[in-house]
Amino acid sequence: MTGSHDIFQYEAPDAPPAAVQVLDPEGHVVDDELLPDLTDQEFVDLYHDMKLTRRTDQRAVSLQRQGRSGTLASCYGQGAHVATAHALDERDWLVPCYREYGTMLARGIDPRYMFMHWMGKEPGDHIPEEYNTVAPPTPVATQIPHATGLAMAAEILGADDRAFLCHFGDGATSEGDFHEGLNFAGAFDTPSIFVCNNNQYAISVPFERQTGSATVAQKATAYGFDGVYVDGMDPLAVYVATAEAVRRAKDPRDGESRQSLIELLLYRLGGHSTSDDPSKYRDEAEVEEWTERDPIARLEAFLQRTGRLDDETVADIESRVDETVDDAVEAAEAAAEEPAAMFDHVYHEPTPELERQAADVESLREQYGDDAFTVEWGF
Ligand SMILES: Cc1ncc(C[n+]2csc(CCOP(=O)(O)OP(=O)(O)O)c2C)c(N)n1
């Protein structure tokens, strides 16, 4: 029994590696070689979509506080996730999570869909087909095997040359769905990109209680693919890592896997949801420290310093974003409830139980009219 440690070939890292970073918190380029090859307009478009996401977020929280909408998971602080959508082609598929809806806005999906979703209006979950985007889920991690299944189905149908990108949080990595989704992706060699938004908490559960691993990214090796640990408060690092994963999914070089696990180390500056009080489980000093790394301020500083953006353009973007969000709220509030539509896309063929439930909804509507479905939000 001597030297038994020598027979172990796989060693778990004790600590995370340095995260991939392009911009420091003040917006200085830290690695010129990693600076993405985007046009000035593409850089500004990314900034626009991050501002649109933040404005949508602020309005949604305000509507919830006024009792005009339901609860939601704000992405305040996590806005750099928007950059993952900028690295996708239109034909690629996006499987977002509830907090990463900025990817949907970046793909051109009108924010009215998000407002309807938060208002509990069923049409909000019927994303027009041309966007190749799945509506965000509420159950934790269920979207991960769905994303792998989509990729497997596309391969079977011969629709290759597209990537399938799926978002989830650190808490989702403790679900069996995470293992099943990544395991199948590796085993069936699908063109999959898994993005873990590690905001360091699953509601009140801190990351060190979620896993004994130093990182989520290292878990990729167990599934036979590559992982990368990224500064998730840096939109350009997020873009570069995703663009590289998209390239690998479609055109892997020797030794590269078509699957990637991207871990974004980030922080949610707000509560888990509008029903949460984060002061119960984390220190204000921690929040202040991460506020300094705000992804929008970081990108704006870089764009201003390099002459790609000026105050006039910022003001113009802000007023356009305000107008888009105002119109979206108006449209969402005016939209019908359509509760029976919730049964339409559960299965390809409705089951007898679903048909019974749909008939119940119709009979309630006949008895009480549309008022039967008006939700009184009272959080
Ligand atoms: C299967 C399931 N279990 C529990 C919940 C309740 N729940 C909602 S969000 C959440 C935490 C998820 O944390 P994480 O995956 O890190 O994502 P985050 O919300 O931090 O973005 C939990 C436990 C749920 N929605 N679904």
Image (cartoon, rainbow, N blue to C red):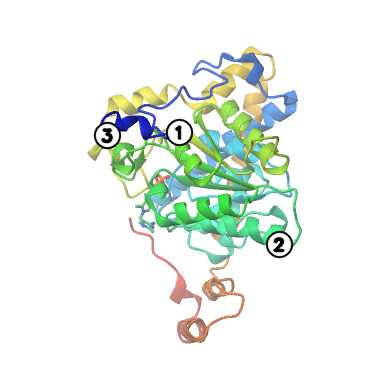
Residue 190 x %, y %: 63, 51
Indicate yes or no: mark 3 CB to ligand 1 under 8 Å: no
Q: Mark 1, residues whose alpha carbon is within 10 Å: few (<14), some, or many (≥20)?
A: many
**Residue 331 in sight from this viewpoint:** yes
Q: Residue at x 27, y 34 (%)?
A: 282
- Identify the secondary structure beneath mark 2: helix
**Amino acid type of the residue tagged 3 in the rendering:** Arg
Instruction: Please name which of the two marks, 1 or 2, marks the residue nearer to the observer.
Output: 2
The disc at residue 282 is 3
Say whether disc 1 or disc 3 marks the residue closer to the N-terminus. Answer: 1
Q: Is residue 56 left or right of residue 293?
A: right
**Amino acid type of the residue tagged 1 in the rendering:** Gly
**Residue 329 in sight from this viewpoint:** no
Residue 122 x %, y %: 54, 66
Q: Is residue 42 left or right of residue 324?
A: right
The disc at residue 77 is 1
**Amino acid type of the residue tagged 2 in the rendering:** Ile
Gap between marks 1 and 2 measured at Cα:
39 Å
Tell me if residue 207 comes above or below residue 153 in the rendering.
above
